[in-house]
Image (cartoon, helix red, strand yellow):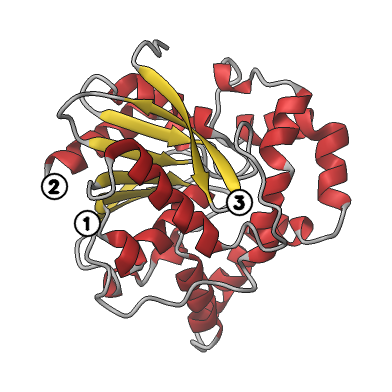
Amino acid sequence: MSTARAKTIVVNSFDAELSVTYYKNKDKPTLLFLHGFPDCQQTWDHQVKGLQKDYAIVTFDMRGVARSTCSGRKNGFHMSFLLEDIERVIDATVGNTAKVHLIGHDWGSVIGWSFISEPNYSKRVLSYTSVSGPHLGLMLDWIKRSLLSKSANRIGSAFRQAALSWYVYLFNIPILPELLFKTIGKPVWKTALTLNGVNKTDEYLHKTKKQISEVCINSINLYRQNPLSPPAVPTKNSINVPVQLIIPNQDRFVSENLFEHYEEYVINLTKKHIAGKHWVHHSHSFMINSFIRDFIQTKP
């Protein structure tokens, strides 16, 4: 992939330095991509390659991941800091009054939902495309609704999602997850990705054991610092950013049922279903790029 127009900068955000890659494209709309776990900004290479001709593109390693430094705070991975990171990246790349089209996957999608739900941040966003990641507060609200519904089907759906989220419980065990990534992290990481949508020939898989540790170990704290202190459930009809929700129907981690009530909160919601797995932006990159392009073309 050509990176001739790419500029790498360091953005200071509180107690973390963020490694940001900016693909400038004069007078073109800006796309800002948010990666998830266990990923870094390179997970978006297929989108950069397919879209950089027509858009300015920003990717970055989230705090504690790869080339970005880790916070020294005990709560440094709490959502409040993650949202501020995004705004700092927008300010540093396109200016403190400009707006971007936001795209998130997995934890990047979870964080993106909170960003567009907060009025102080949502004013920086023209549109939001979410892939395989719910609003954390709405996820917990859906589980509560389902368990209290007295419907056997809905209660069963809540327990099935709990089973799909088995790794969340694992990551909350002290020491063990870090030990696993330090010892057998490379085969575990590659197996998880190839079983869930990343082709075995994908260049993204060409990471060393050290690089995989740098991607995974610090960001385990996302799972320790946010589910027990989730963002508030948005007020109904309060999310006025146009949202495109892309739902892979073979996702082993995120159930389609989690998005059951989103029409109650998002004023302008478009749902797209795709026959793919969790890393669908790798396996179906052309389709995902088309979804992003088509959605953005209908927005300001």
How many C-alpha atoms fall within 10 Å of the one at disc 2: few (<14), some, or many (≥20)? few
How many C-alpha atoms fall within 10 Å of the one at disc 3: few (<14), some, or many (≥20)? some
Name the kind of residue labelled 1 in the image. Answer: Pro
Q: Which of marks 3 and 1 is in front?
A: 3
Please name the residue that numbered disc 2 is placed on. Answer: 299
Q: Earlier along the polypeptide chain: callout 2 or callout 1?
A: 1
Q: Nearer the viewer, mark 2 or mark 3?
A: 3
In this rendering, is residue 183 above or below 49? below
Disc 3 to disc 1, C-alpha distance: 32 Å
In this rendering, is residue 15 above or below 139? above
Disc 2 to disc 1, C-alpha distance: 8 Å
Answer whether residue 106 is visible to the viewer in this image.
no
Asked if disc 3 and disc 1 are in contact, CB closer than 8 Å, the reply is no
Answer with left or right where residue 173 lies relative to residue 75.
Answer: right
Foreground pick, 163 / 72: 72
Asked if disc 2 and disc 1 are in contact, CB closer than 8 Å, the reply is yes
Please name the residue that numbered disc 1 is placed on. Answer: 242
Q: Earlier along the polypeptide chain: callout 2 or callout 3?
A: 3
Answer with left or right where residue 253 lies relative to residue 281.
Answer: right
Residue appearing at x 56%, y 78% in the figure: 155
| Residue 165, x across and y down, in percent | 65, 59
Foreground pick, 43 / 263: 43
Please name the residue that numbered disc 3 is placed on. Answer: 15
Asked if disc 2 and disc 3 are in contact, CB closer than 8 Å, the reply is no
Determine the image quadrant of residue 268: bottom left
